[in-house]
């Protein structure tokens, strides 16, 4: 590969450990507020992460636990809106932090003059405050699930970043943490670097160009330093 033209980051589980300590906590708070007995422990939530998109995850859960598909969809929509508001509060409280190694990698890319972008299926309502609070104005293009509702493994979010950035696909690298994310990046034609987290340790990431144990894994930094 030639010099890197850009790096596109996933958010959930990649830039931040948002799933276990952010989204899961927010979903449970929304259940409680609504007077529902539902509660997602860490293991259950890990299993549910196979379903991309918060509203869809809720709808599938409600159906699996005995509601009609119409009731499940309606309840999921209502709770998802409330959950998003709770997630924003958690972000403002500083509860969602960068994964180890992320700031260092972003610093290296910035020093190398490599633009960084974001492709996420999360909603803009919480993605924007999160990026602002944790990273400041680092990312040039931010495509969220609000503009591109096709969830990963659809390549749509990556396609939109590439369209806006106008950078050559083969010189643009995606960074992901999950099988759905890697598949989305590869489907868009991007080489993908994958960094496992606790929830994605059993995911098949074999389509990635490099698989690392985290963003602080020395093999990941060495790989980027070779490309910059
Ligand atoms: Mg992810």
Image (cartoon, rainbow, N blue to C red):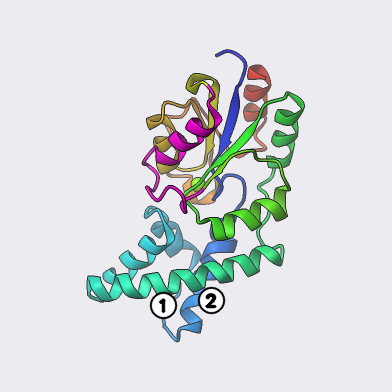
Q: Residue furthest toward the top? A: 2
Where does the image place residue 79, in percent across and percent down from the top left?
A: 44, 74
Write down the quadrant of residue 40 in the picture.
bottom left
Q: Is residue 54 visible?
A: yes
Does the segment drawn in magenta span residue 159? yes
Q: Nearer the viewer, residue 142 or 207?
A: 142
Q: Nearer the viewer, residue 65 or 161?
A: 161
Residue at 37% across, 31% down: 187
Query: The N terminus appears in which quarter of the rendering?
Result: top right
- Per the rendered image, the range of residues in magenta is 144-167
Query: The C terminus appears in which quarter of the rendering?
Result: top right
Q: Is residue 194 visible?
A: no
Circle 1: element type? loop
The residue wearing badge 1 is: 38
Residue 178 marker: none
198 lies above or below 34: above
Where does the image place residue 29, in percent across and percent down from the top left?
A: 53, 76
Residue at 50% across, 49% down: 144
Residue at 43% across, 44% down: 202
The residue wearing badge 2 is: 29
Q: Residue furthest toward the bottom? A: 35
Left or right side of 11 for 149: left
């Amino acid at each position: 590969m030639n010099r890197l033209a850009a790096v596109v980051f996933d958010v959930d589980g990649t830039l931040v450990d948002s799933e276990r300590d952010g989204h899961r906590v927010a979903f449970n708070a929304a259940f409680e507020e609504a007077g529902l007995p539902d509660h997602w422990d860490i293991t259950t939530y890990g299993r549910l992460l196979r379903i991309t998109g918060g509203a869809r995850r809720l709808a599938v859960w409600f159906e699996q636990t005995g509601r009609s598909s119409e009731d499940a969809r309606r309840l999921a929509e209502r709770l998802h809106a409330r959950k998003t508001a709770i997630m924003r509060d958690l972000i403002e409280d500083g509860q969602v932090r960068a994964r180890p190694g992320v700031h260092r990698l972003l610093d290296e890319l910035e020093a190398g003059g490599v633009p960084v972008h974001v492709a996420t299926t999360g909603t803009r309502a919480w993605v924007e405050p999160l990026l602002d609070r944790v990273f400041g104005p680092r990312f040039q293009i931010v495509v969220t699930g609000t503009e591109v509702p096709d969830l990963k493994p659809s390549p749509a979010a990556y396609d939109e970043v590439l369209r806006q950035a106008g950078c050559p696909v083969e010189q643009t690298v995606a960074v992901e943490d999950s099988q759905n994310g890697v598949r989305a990046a590869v489907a868009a034609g991007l080489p993908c670097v994958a960094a496992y987290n606790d929830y994605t340790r059993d995911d098949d990431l074999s389509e990635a160009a490099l698989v690392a144990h985290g963003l602080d894994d020395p093999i990941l930094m060495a790989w980027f330093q070779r490309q910059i």
